[in-house]
Image (tube, coloured by chain):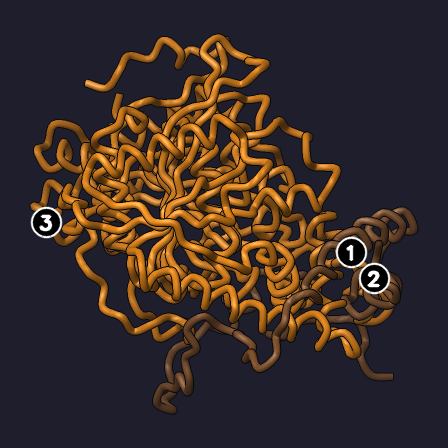
Chain colours: A orange, B brown
Amino acid sequence: MLHRLTIAELTARLARREVSARDAMQACLDQVARVDGDIKAFISLSPTDALAQADAADQAIAAGADFSAQPLLGVPIALKDVLAVKDQPLNCASRILGSFTSPYDATVVTRLKAAGAIIFGRLNMDEFAMGSSTENSAFQTTRNPWDTSRIPGGSSGGSAAAVAADECIASLGSDTGGSIRQPAALCGCVGLKPTYGRVSRYGLVAFASSLDQIGPFTKDVRDAATLLEVISGHDPRDATSIPQPVPRYTQALTGDIRGLRLGLPKEFMVGGLDPEVKRAVDAAVTHLQSLGATVHEVSLPHTDHDVAVYYIIATAEASANLARFDGVRYGARVEGADPLEMYGNTRGAGFGAEVKRRIILGTYVLSSGYYDAYYLRAQKVRTLIRQDYLRAFEQVDAIITPTTPTPAFRLGEKAGDPLQMYLSDIFTIGCNLAGIPGLSLPCGFAKPSQPSTLNSQLPIGLQLLGKPFGEETLLRLAHAYEQSTPWHREHALCPPANPCMSDTPPD
Amino acid sequence: MSAPDFDIKYVAHLARLKLSPEEETQLGAQLGNILGYIEKLKEVDVTGVEPTAHAFPMVNVFRADEVRPGLSNDDALRNAPKRASGLFVVPKVVE
């Protein structure tokens, strides 16, 4: 079944002309039709457009296209609804953008298209990337394919669920405080947040401009390396993108991690860590040692302040970035007698509760009289947090942690308490503040105490954090671990009533 | 414990957000709670520490002052809630 393949597996078959791009795209569309009624990963998609792109890819292959020049030729990839694709809807899972269609392509989209990818569908997310469960979408709630009574994580919940449910071969999401790594962990796939500035943010609807990065969701580490290679690189249109050359990330997957030094931050192994998560991560560390890595304790003394610093800086930046949604030039305007009234009405009607919460918090911490006590102070503590990581990287090559304190929680469990939701980001947030790269990959499963399906098991994610522009080391470590463990070969089960339960395994 | 002077009506006005009375009450309480948590930042000694605005600050990222293609007038207006004569139409700004 073609939708269950990885990028590497599919492109090999396409190159050998064993299957067509149309077959692969149709297989994904069929899977969406089978399971998305339950999973609800997609806000929208156009089968006609997707198949037309597939036909174009088939024509290119027939004309002798070179897969080394176009490594994604014919591969169906879906995108989080926060990335601009020309002539496709762009909503950020919010009502305020109304029927907006994008007049331009994000740089990452231009790069994906140049690599031959088929770009289809708008994937669900927390509104304006604000959330950790995808429960803040104005449109629908996405469910975890491993247990549909649970969240897929957020804010890129749709991107993670779609890959885990084999609705697409890979997807892109964005990560500001963990929004790629956390849903990847909860949905059992690979998620990578590049070093800040590695990937252009042109065409990414901005949440927090000093924290946001775009990154891949894939079924295995090799695919993540492939996608990272395609989307990375300096972009003159993003003044924060760094002019660092892009290495051939796929060549970092040597399988040899002997002598690599792993750091375990003592402040991370705290109370509130689910015992099964601790067990799985401890086992992963031991396994990595057996492959030749060495383990050292490191200290990140300001860890306890990560969440507070993040929720000041990110909300402050968000309050500025979301000021543009005022009903003047685009979106669902609500009229008023004068512009001020129009802004208030439009934004009051168009934004959801979490977005309003964060805009108000951000506005407050930047306001006159409070700027020094909150925003400026948070920026100084951010310096201390960043220095903690850089100091640790003088002794180790990568830092290893659980990605989340618990496996996926139930829908509605934390929705009523915003602060509890924020605290669940505790392991992922420091990475964005420091600007360093981070990757999550599957490291085992937890058995829930009250299973809701026959084969209930919930994925657990292992997080690797690297030096600035240290993605090669992360990929090498992750790949070596993955290839000597069984987790990546398991695919999520669909709800019992759904035919995909009897799906035949990949050929 | 919550921040002493948090006036949700004022901040919502700064943010150009119209809130219902229920929203004001609920958001006010939730934000008070969050601000109470954030107070812990006051414990940190930040003497002599420079603020970080960006992890990798880029300075003077300029390009040559040359005209380049941008969005056409039509593309810029394609999502306009109200348009006329190649312009966005808004409520009266000036008395």
Residue A40 can be seen in this image:
no
The residue located at (48%, 41%) in the rendering is: A182
The residue located at (63%, 48%) in the rendering is: A94
Where residue B92 sits: x, y (%)?
A: 81, 76
Which residue is the site of mark 1? B36
**Label 2 packing within 10 angstroms: few (<14), some (14-19), many (20+):** some
Which residue is the site of mark 2? B3
Marks 3 and 2, how far apart in space? 61 Å
- For the residue marked with disc 3, what is the amino acid? Asp
- For the residue marked with disc 1, what is the amino acid? Gly
Secondary structure under tag 1 reads helix
The residue located at (40%, 29%) in the rendering is: A280
Query: Disc 1: which chain?
Result: B
Which residue is the site of mark 3? A66
Where residue A395 sits: x, y (%)?
A: 31, 60
Where residue A381 sits: x, y (%)?
A: 58, 68
- For the residue marked with disc 2, what is the amino acid? Ala
Q: How many marks?
A: 3
Q: Are marks 2 and 1 in contact (CB under 8 Å)?
A: yes
Say yes or no: labels 3 and 1 on the same chain: no
